[in-house]
Amino acid sequence: SYVAACAKHFVGDGGTTNGINGNNTAINYKRLVNIHMNPYFDAIAKGVSTIMVSYSSWNGDKMHANHFLISHILKKKHGFKGFVISDFKGIDMITNPPNANYSLSVLKGVGAGIDMVMVPYNYTKFINDLTTQVQG
């Protein structure tokens, strides 16, 4: 039998300003890859099933809304076929302040390539917003 493993928190958690969870990782792409991304690429090569997105930002862009890193780099370039999972209420934190525009956050998070969203409390609003966006 197999166990589904989750590599987390993609990406840059160890390099955030002052080491604060959810803060910004200010680094160029080459250094981001060399310092923070290679373990994820190794995990993909070994068949990891899920990758959880970080609360952090990369050069000011929230990871939960980062289409380039999630869809282009993880999925397209490195062939990740598993589920990309949000962190707990991670979609809520895309805007500043959190929940300032929940519909936009849903659009950006799912549009970035998040496949499974952890929505513990706002799930009815999430389902309604996502359904409206898909139908629209």
Image (cartoon, helix red, strand yellow):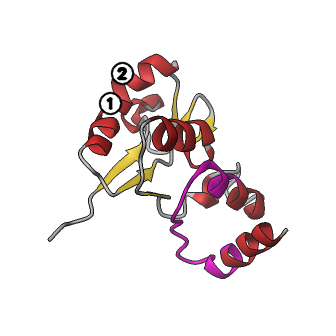
User: Image point 44% across, 25% down: which residue?
Assistant: 32
Question: Mark 2 highlights which residue?
Answer: 34
Q: From the viewer's perspective, tell me whether residue 82 is left or right of residue 71.
A: left
Q: Measured along the vertical axis of the image, is residue 55 above or below residue 60?
A: below
- Under circle 1, the secondary element is helix
Q: Quadrant of residue 60?
A: top right
User: Image point 67% across, 77% down: which residue?
Assistant: 127
Q: Quadrant of residue 100?
A: bottom right
**Residue 117 x, y percent position in the rendering:** 54, 66
Q: From the viewer's perspective, tell me whether residue 67 is left or right of residue 53.
A: right
Identified by mark 2, the residue type is Asn
**Residue 68 x, y percent position in the rendering:** 59, 36
**Residue 33 x, y percent position in the rendering:** 41, 25
User: Image point 67% across, 56% down: which residue?
Assistant: 98
- Few, some or many residues within 10 Å of mark 1 (<14, 14–19, 20+): few
Q: Measured along the vertical axis of the image, is residue 26 above or below residue 55?
A: above
Q: Nearer the viewer, residue 78 or 99?
A: 78
Q: Quadrant of residue 42?
A: top left
**Residue 55 x, y percent position in the rendering:** 50, 48
Q: Measured along the vertical axis of the image, is residue 121 above or below residue 81?
A: below
Question: Mark 1 highlights which residue?
Answer: 38
**Quadrant holding the C terminus:** bottom right
Identified by mark 1, the residue type is Asn
User: Looking at the image, do the residues carrying marks 1 and 2 touch, with CB atoms under 8 Å apart?
Assistant: yes
**Quadrant holding the N terminus:** bottom left
Q: Nearer the viewer, residue 91 or 114?
A: 114
The verdict on residue 63 being magenta is no
User: Image point 42% across, 37% down: which residue?
Assistant: 78
Residues at marks 1 and 2, CA–CA distance in whole angstroms:
6 Å
- Outermost residue toward the left in this view: 1
Q: Which residues are magenta?
A: 108-126
